[in-house]
């Protein structure tokens, strides 16, 4: 009796067949929002001029596979012209990661980022192919579903007990390659090869720069996402030219699950129809690690409701899930990334209100505000077993804030951040976020045209109607 085909075959078949018509209106709108938000976040990093994106783009334009600005078929989000899809995916993928303002997959089995890799890759290929908005939406939806399926199969042990493999690098390159291959019109066999190439060659994305104990907080975090996006594009392009790869890159011996699950694996499962798991992708309301959002909101709510000033607050205890208490407990704010991954800093910002809970609060010069830095000494972060269990059961990111002021104790618990599937951001909020990210980049008229087209991507006959405005 012949052996059953590996589950990767069914996953590739699902991805190849998925069309925009298979998506209900809510899912289609969600995917459009995810694409638009990812582009805005990347452009926001360009506007801020962060070094990791700037250095990557300067390297590519000067020494890489794009000879000069203005050539190629895909658009650099920095506004510096065009390039080949692989080079553009590298640059835009790096920019999209910089601000840590990107999407987050929220699932009891695993958490991480997906669209931040998938969108830069897929949009570059869609431009080259002259694809329509509906084709892009279907491709991104398929890429997200593939990524989430892999994350669920792997579990979260890949970053436990001192290990630091990033979910973005383990699964998102395969999802992004799937999206790119789909946009190129590859059949199941081609998708399998693109998945196999990207999974076998993916940068593992170790996380030493996200460890407070190491204290580095370097730019490698950003560049590895650009590398993953470029890998996805090139895997799909090479698969289209006939390059082969294993069709067991996820579930097979020495594959992704075997290498990263550490005994916590589950079967690789294929969605039964549509794109039901896109709802697990949250968009961020604050420009910081997703693990600090509920604590920020809870602290700000107490201060606002009680009309407290920072000077009246004696102490703050922040309860979060155990691993967040450990990984987000850093108190040395050496640069913008250290600020984005520090619960004490984020809660201090929410209480002092110095720069507000805005993008600027996590940038120079706000991160050196002596009032905010001094207030951090009043904040204690603890791992709460109940919140740890809640996260494991639901995938939520709960926080409990206990604030002492004026001789009283005030408490607030929030389980799901704004932007999650339980509390999705409105189109108006997404447009406001885009405007906050892009001050002075274009005329107001052009910016509003970008917002209008970006939030109606699925109605465009050619995605270049949107990207040409960037």
Image (cartoon, rainbow, N blue to C red):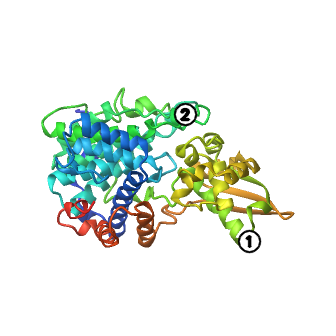
What's the residue at 34%, 67% (across, down)?
Answer: 29
Farthest residue, direction top: 254
> Which quadrant is home to the C terminus?
bottom left
Q: Position of residue 301 (x, y in %)?
A: 67, 67
Image disc number at residue 216:
2
Few, some or many residues within 10 Å of mark 2 (<14, 14–19, 20+): some
The one nearer the camera, 169 or 445, is: 445
**CA–CA distance between discs 2 and 1?**
38 Å
Compared to residue 416, the image places residue 143 above or below, namely: above
Q: Is residue 243 visible?
A: yes
Image disc number at residue 392:
none
In the picture, residue 431 is in which quadrant? bottom left
| Residue 164 shown left or right of residue 269 in the figure | right
Secondary-structure class at tag 1: loop
> Which quadrant is home to the N terminus?
top left
Dot 2 and dot 1 residues touching (CB under 8 Å) = no
| Residue 330 shown left or right of residue 31 in the figure | right
| Residue 467 shown left or right of residue 295 in the figure | left
The residue that disc 1 covers is 307
What's the residue at 37%, 68% (across, down)?
Answer: 26
Q: Position of residue 176 (x, y in %)?
A: 30, 46
Q: Is residue 195 visible?
A: no
Few, some or many residues within 10 Å of mark 1 (<14, 14–19, 20+): few
What's the residue at 29%, 33% (across, down)?
Answer: 248
The one nearer the camera, 253 or 200, is: 200
Farthest residue, direction left: 241
């Amino acid at each position: 009796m012949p052996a059953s085909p590996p589950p990767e075959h069914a996953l590739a078949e699902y991805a190849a067949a998925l069309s925009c018509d298979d998506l209900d209106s809510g899912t289609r709108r969600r995917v459009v929002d995810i694409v638009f938000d990812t582009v805005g976040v990347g452009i926001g990093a360009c506007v801020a001029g962060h070094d990791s994106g700037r250095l990557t783009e300067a390297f590519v334009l000067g020494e890489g596979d794009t000879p000069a600005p203005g050539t190629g078929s895909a658009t650099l989000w920095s506004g510096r012209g065009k390039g080949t899809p692989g080079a553009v995916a590298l640059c835009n993928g790096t920019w999209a990661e910089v601000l840590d303002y990107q999407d987050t997959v929220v699932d009891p089995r695993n958490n991480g980022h997906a669209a931040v890799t998938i969108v830069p890759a897929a949009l570059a290929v869609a431009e080259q192919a002259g694809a329509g908005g509906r084709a892009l939406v279907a491709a991104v939806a398929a890429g997200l579903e593939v990524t989430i399926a892999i994350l669920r199969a792997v579990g979260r042990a890949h970053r436990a007990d001192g290990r630091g493999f990033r979910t973005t690098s383990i699964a998102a390159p395969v999802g992004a390659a799937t999206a790119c291959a789909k946009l190129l019109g590859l059949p199941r066999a081609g998708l399998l090869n693109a998945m196999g190439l990207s999974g076998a060659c993916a940068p593992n994305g170790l996380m030493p720069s996200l460890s407070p104990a190491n204290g580095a907080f370097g730019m490698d975090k950003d560049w590895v996402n650009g590398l993953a996006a470029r890998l996805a594009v090139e895997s799909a392009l090479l698969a289209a030219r006939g390059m082969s790869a294993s069709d067991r890159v996820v579930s097979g011996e020495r594959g992704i699950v075997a290498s990263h699950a550490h005994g916590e694996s589950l079967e690789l499962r294929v969605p039964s129809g549509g794109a039901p798991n896109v709802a697990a992708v949250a968009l961020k309301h604050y420009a910081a690690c997703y693990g600090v959002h509920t604590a920020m909101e809870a602290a700000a709510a107490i201060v606002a409701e009680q009309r407290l000033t920072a000077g009246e607050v004696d102490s703050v205890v922040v309860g979060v899930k155990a691993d967040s208490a450990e990984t987000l407990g850093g108190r040395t704010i050496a640069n913008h990334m250290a600020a984005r991954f520090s619960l004490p800093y984020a809660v201090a910002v929410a209480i002092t209100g110095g720069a507000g809970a805005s993008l600027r609060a996590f940038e120079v010069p706000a991160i050196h505000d002596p009032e905010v830095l001094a207030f951090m000494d009043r904040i204690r972060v603890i791992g709460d077993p109940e919140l740890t269990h809640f996260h494991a059961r639901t995938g939520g990111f709960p926080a409990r804030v206990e604030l002492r002021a004026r001789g009283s104790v005030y408490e607030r618990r929030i389980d799901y951040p704004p932007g999650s599937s339980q509390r999705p951001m409105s189109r108006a909020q997404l447009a406001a976020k885009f405007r906050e990210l892009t001050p002075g980049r274009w005329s107001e008229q052009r910016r509003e045209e970008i917002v209008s087209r970006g939030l109606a991507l699925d109605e465009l006959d050619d995605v270049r109607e949107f990207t040409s405005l960037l």
